[in-house]
Amino acid sequence: MDSVWVVLVPSLSPKTAPLFEIDPAGEVLIVVPPPSSGSGQSSALYHHDGIRIKVSAKHLCMASPVFKAKLSHFHPSTSTQPDGRVHLRLATGLDPKAVYLVFSALHPGLPTRHLPKQLDSVKTLAHVAVVVDRLGLLDYVEVYAERWINRLWKGAVGKYSREWALWVYVASVFGREDIFEAASRRVIEEHSGGANFEALFSSLDLPLHIDVIRTLESRHTKLLTNAVNVVNALMNQLMLVDSNCLCGTSLLGTLVTALSKSRLL
């Protein structure tokens, strides 16, 4: 699905949608559709008509081949709306707050931009990662993302599995192999009984690349194989125990029963 398209006449941006001016003199109006109900996207900047953001065409073209391709194929005389700007409507599924943060990062030096030193949650960070991934903006957001990632990662210990899945996605987008290793291990361990990683990330509205899903599946298979090998080795050792030793026989029976219940035997 295309992540952005040019809106010609009539504009699909209701005037009731909140307007944010990252660049007040910007030639482009970004139209962010409202999130679908139940999407789980952040409540900040919510509005039933979505939001609008004034941005610079020059900064968009410099930052993203997606926007450069869109803007280079339209002449100002035929593409501008009554407000004198080209309107670019983003595809659905992008969080308004995350879009605002990412587009602020594309306009360094402008006094109107607002980039926090810290994000409120890994969920917000994952929404930012989706925008970056869909629009090809990694190079321009990476420096800010590193700061957000490092501060949030410090408090990541002990979170539930869905948050670890968010961390897997964030790490895959921003190339944080250290976090990917730790988070993917937790996700795999907590889904050892029958993992469907594609369904897990789909339920979180995260477009995880298929090669990353295959990596998780491969590591999951390897983990199970290693576990079975360890158990088989232990069974072989218990079988060698003197049959007169009730302790060894009892342990072997308990182990066999547990493996049978888990369908590992």
Image: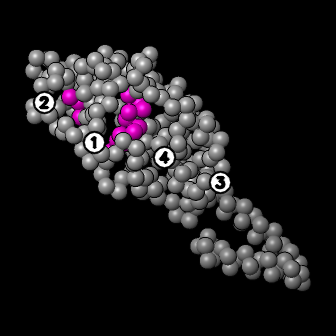
Q: Is residue 113 magenta?
A: no
Q: From which residue to which does the magenta span run?
A: 87-103
Callout 3 amino acid: Gly
Quadrant in the rendering for residue 73:
top left
Secondary structure under badge 4?
helix
| Badge 1 or badge 3: first in the primary sequence | 1
The residue at the point 36 percent across, 53 percent down is: 39
Disc 1, SS: loop
Local crowd size for mark 1, using a 10 Å CA cut-off: few (<14), some (14–19), many (≥20): many
User: Mark 3 sits on what residue?
Assistant: 158
Residue 26 image offset from top left, x and y in percent: 28, 19
Residue 50 is marked as: 1
For the residues labelled 1 and 2, the Cα–Cα distance comes to 18 Å
Circle nearer the N terminus (2, 3): 2
Quadrant in which residue 134 is drawn: top left
The residue to which callout 2 is attached is 8
Q: Amino acid at mark 4?
A: Lys
Depth check, mark 1 against mark 2: the one in front is 1
